[in-house]
Amino acid sequence: MHKKAMYWIKKDKDVVQCVLCPHGCVITPGNRGICRVRYNNNGTLESLNYGLCTALALDPIEKKPLYNFYPGSKILSVGTFGCNLKCSFCQNWTIAHGENPPVYEVTSLELADLAQKHKAEGNIGLAYTYSEPLMWYEFVLETAKEVSNKGLKNVLVSNGYINEEPLQELLPFIDAANIDVKGYNDTFYPKMCKGKLEPVKKTVALLAPHCHVEVTTLVIPGENDKVEEIEELARWLSTVSPEVTLHLTRYFPNYRLNLPPTPRKTLEKAREAALRHLSKVYLGNI
């Protein structure tokens, strides 16, 4: 479903520049941005995934993962297609980068009503997850308002790759977030994700004063698994907020990266180092 996008600039000759995320894609008519879901239709930037759903499930809140936000509850989880990073190890690549995933149309009010319907089963709200929800921006913003109006919680599970202005507009409606900080060295993001670390750090720092924040790092052998690097990540998170929860999760081969799974001992040493700075550090996928 096409909808006029937010956060873009009109250029000459019907060229547009998207300013939703740090890529700042300059898009000529008939083409899309890096995310594949923001499209230049004769000089107007449109969202191609507005109201299009690829996945919907009632999940334990811990699956997001959120371990310290209403533990034991459930959350209705929804996703679309598209992503503005190109992680070679993507765990949800079939909908993030796959061509023509199965979709069905849904409205913001329908999702809010469905979330409310599941309250009797322990549901606390709606989680935007699976692919990259920030590339579903217009729909997520509209839906989050509907969910908030019903007194339910909005949860964002994201790569955090967004510019400050659109994030600030969304922030009042977000109750909790799990942000992927995919690596904490200068080379990881450009090499493995086709992005940059600094915008993600800025997102975490902006979120922390306003909502509950947990961070996930997928620990990949030889790429971002140095104990010193994990400790530096934890040290930085502690300066953002000592209450931030860190999840260190085990890598398994997926998408375009075929390395051996992360040794459990690597994760245990990384957790030990992170606990010098944070009180809540968990291991995942083990």
Image (cartoon, grey):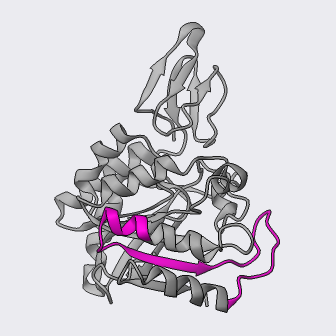
Residue 219, located in which quarter of the rendered image? bottom right
Residue 143 image point, x, y percent: 32, 53
Which one is nearer the viewer's eye here, 115 or 84?
84
Residue 88 image point, x, y percent: 73, 59
- The residue that appears at 23% across and 58% down in the rendered structure is 210
Which one is nearer the viewer's eye here, 247 or 62?
247
Q: Is residue 262 within the magenta segment?
A: yes
Let me know if residue 98 appears in the view: no
Residue 151, located in which quarter of the rendered image? bottom left
- The residue that appears at 68% across and 77% down in the rendered structure is 251
In the rendered image, the vertical position of residue 282 relative to residue 131, given as above or below: below
* Image side of residue 76 versus residue 113, left or right: right
Magenta extent: 235-264
The quadrant the C terminus occupies is bottom right
Q: Residue furthest top?
A: 13
Q: Is residue 11 within the magenta segment?
A: no
- The residue that appears at 26% across and 79% down in the rendered structure is 119
* Image side of residue 134 versus residue 166, left or right: right
- The residue that appears at 69% across and 62% down in the rendered structure is 94
Residue 285, located in which quarter of the rendered image? bottom right
Which one is nearer the viewer's eye here, 131 or 181?
181
Residue 107 image point, x, y percent: 38, 52
Residue 72 image point, x, y percent: 33, 90
